[in-house]
Image: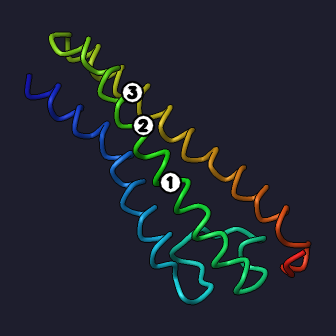
Amino acid sequence: MFFFVTMFICNLLVPIILIGFGYFMYKYPPKQINGIIGYRTKMSRKSMETWIFAQKYCGRLWLKIGFLMIIPTILVQIPFIHSSVDAIGTATFIIEMVQVAIVLLTIVPVELALRRVFDENGIRK
């Protein structure tokens, strides 16, 4: 049971981190373009305006996705409550890989939004 609870908590970390970072990216975007913190792609660094837009857009997206991921993450784990350590470990691995894939896929809508609103030089259309 201890292993299940530990893995349950681990699986909830990604949605909780998305909610936390999403909130701070949306409400308090990094004030300077940098290579350490924030949504950092070539397009988001074109100008200060693209930088702020990308942080806020990605922040809102991460907030929504984080909240949406919590319920399925919990529901998928419930059937494994009395399973073997191997089954729980495999389920945890699959859940976390799906979560990581979802996080990586958020790059697509943010980049599309940047290209819809800004030209290739980072100037608002």
Q: Dot 1 corresponds to which residue?
A: 62
Quarter of the figure that contains the N terminus: top left
Quarter of the figure that contains the C terminus: bottom right
Rounded to the nearest angstrom, the CA distance separating label 1 from label 3 is: 16 Å
Q: Could you say which quadrant of the image residue 79 lies in?
A: top left
59 horizontally vs 48: left or right: left
Q: Residue at x 60, y 47 (%)?
A: 104
Distance between the alpha carbons at the discs numbered 2 and 1 = 10 Å
Residue 21 position (above or below residue 96): below
In primary-sequence order, the first of circles 1 and 3 is: 1
Tell me where residue 95 appears, x and y as whole percent: 41, 28
Q: Which residue is mark 3?
A: 72
Asked which secondary structure carries label 2, the reply is: helix
> Hey, which residue is sitting farthest left in the picture?
2
Crowding near the residue tagged with mark 3, few <14, some 14–19, many ≥20 C-alpha atoms within 10 Å: few
Residue 98 horizontal/vertical position (percent): 50, 32
| Residue visible at 39% across and 55% down in the picture | 19
Q: Could you say whether the residue bearing mark 1 is in a helix, strand or loop? A: helix
Is the C-beta separation of discs 1 and 3 under 8 Å? no
- For badge 2, the amino acid type reads Met
Q: Residue at x 54, y 72 (%)?
A: 38
Q: Is residue 54 above or below residue 108?
A: below
CB-based contact (under 8 Å), mark 3 and mark 2: yes
Q: Residue at the spot x=59%, y=61% of the render?
A: 58
Name which residue type carries label 1: Trp
- Mark 2 highlights which residue? 69
Percent position of residue 35, x then y: 59, 79
Tell me: 19 left or right of 45.
left
| CB-based contact (under 8 Å), mark 2 and mark 1 | no
